[in-house]
Amino acid sequence: MKRVKFALIVLMSLILIHGCKEPDEIRTKDDNVSGNKMNTNVKEIPMPYAVAKYDCPVLNTGDFSGVYGGSSGSTLRKSKNGLVKPLEFVAYAGTTFEITDSIKNKMSTIYKVRTEEYPIILEGTDLFVDARFVELRSTKPEPAKKTCPPRNYIYDYFDKSGSSYYVWGGNNISGVEKMLDFYPPQKKLQSREDSLTWKIEGVDCSGILYEATKAYTPRNTHQLVKF
C-alpha cells in the first residue's frame, strides 16, 4: 500500500511540474506515417482528376519546355539515336488522368498523373501532362467503352499510314494539333525530321496499332505481348 501511495505522489508531482497535455496535442513518433495515423505531408488536390480535351502528349518529365524548345527555344531533347524519349505516348481526347501533384512554371501548370491507359512507363517513373491539354474534374469519369473497329477500317488506316515517319511515343499520323499552339518553336526548324517530331506527327511500333484500332489495343509492346 505504501508503494502505491508513493507512486501516486510521484505521478501527481510530475503532472504539476510539466502540465497535462490535451489529447490533440499528443503526438507519437508514428504520427506521420500512412494508415490510420496522421499524415501531415499529404496535400489535398481539390480537383483530383483530369480529362484530355485534345490529343495530349504524356511525358516522363515535367520539363516540357526543356524537351520542346530548350535554352534556344527551338531545340528538341534527343537521345544519341535521335529520339525524343521523354515522350511516352499521346493520350487521345477523352483519356482520364488521376492527378497526384502539380508544378507551376512560367508557361503553364504541369500535372503529375497516373492513367489506366498507360500502366508501364518505359523511360522513367512518373507521367506528366500540360494543364492546357486537359480539363479538371472533381470525380473520376466513367471510362469509355472500347470496341475494335471493323477490319476494313484498320486496313484503310494501314494504307494511309504507309509513308508515316517514325516518332518515338507517337500514335498520331496527322500529328498533335495543339503542340505548335502551346509550344511554338522560336525559329524555323532546320529539318523536316525535327518538324515532324515536334508536332508528334508519326508513330512508333505499338503506336501504329494503337491508332489503327482506336486505342483498342494496348499502347506499348510490353502489354501487347500478353494481349
Image (tube, rainbow, N blue to C red):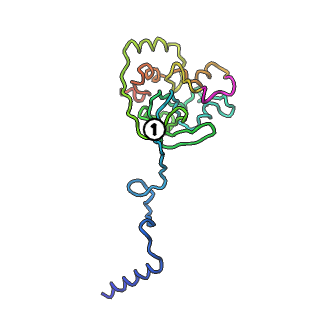
Instruction: Choose top left, top right, bottom left or bottom right for residue 201.
Output: top right
Q: Position of residue 142 (x, y in %)?
A: 38, 34
Q: Position of residue 114 (x, y in %)?
A: 45, 38
Q: Quadrant of the N terminus?
A: bottom left
Examine the structure image and report whether residue 33 is included in the region drawn in magenta: no
Nearer to the camera, 95 or 196: 95
Q: Is residue 11 above or below residue 24?
A: below
**186 within the magenta span:** yes
Q: Is residue 23 above or below residue 35?
A: below
Q: Quadrant of residue 165?
A: top right
Of 81 and 23, the residue lying toward us: 23
Q: Is residue 122 left or right of residue 178?
A: left
Write down the residue under mark 1.
Answer: 137
Identify the residue shown where x is 38% and y is 56%: 36
Write the start and end of the magenta stretch as one range: 180-188
Q: Quadrant of residue 177?
A: top right
- Give the amino acid at mark 1: Arg
**Quadrant, the C terminus:** top left
Q: Residue at x 53, y 32 (%)?
A: 133
Q: Residue at left 40%, top 58%?
A: 37
- Assign a secondary structure to mark 1: strand
Most frequent secondary structure within the magenta stretch:
loop
Residue 137, placed above or below residue 189? below
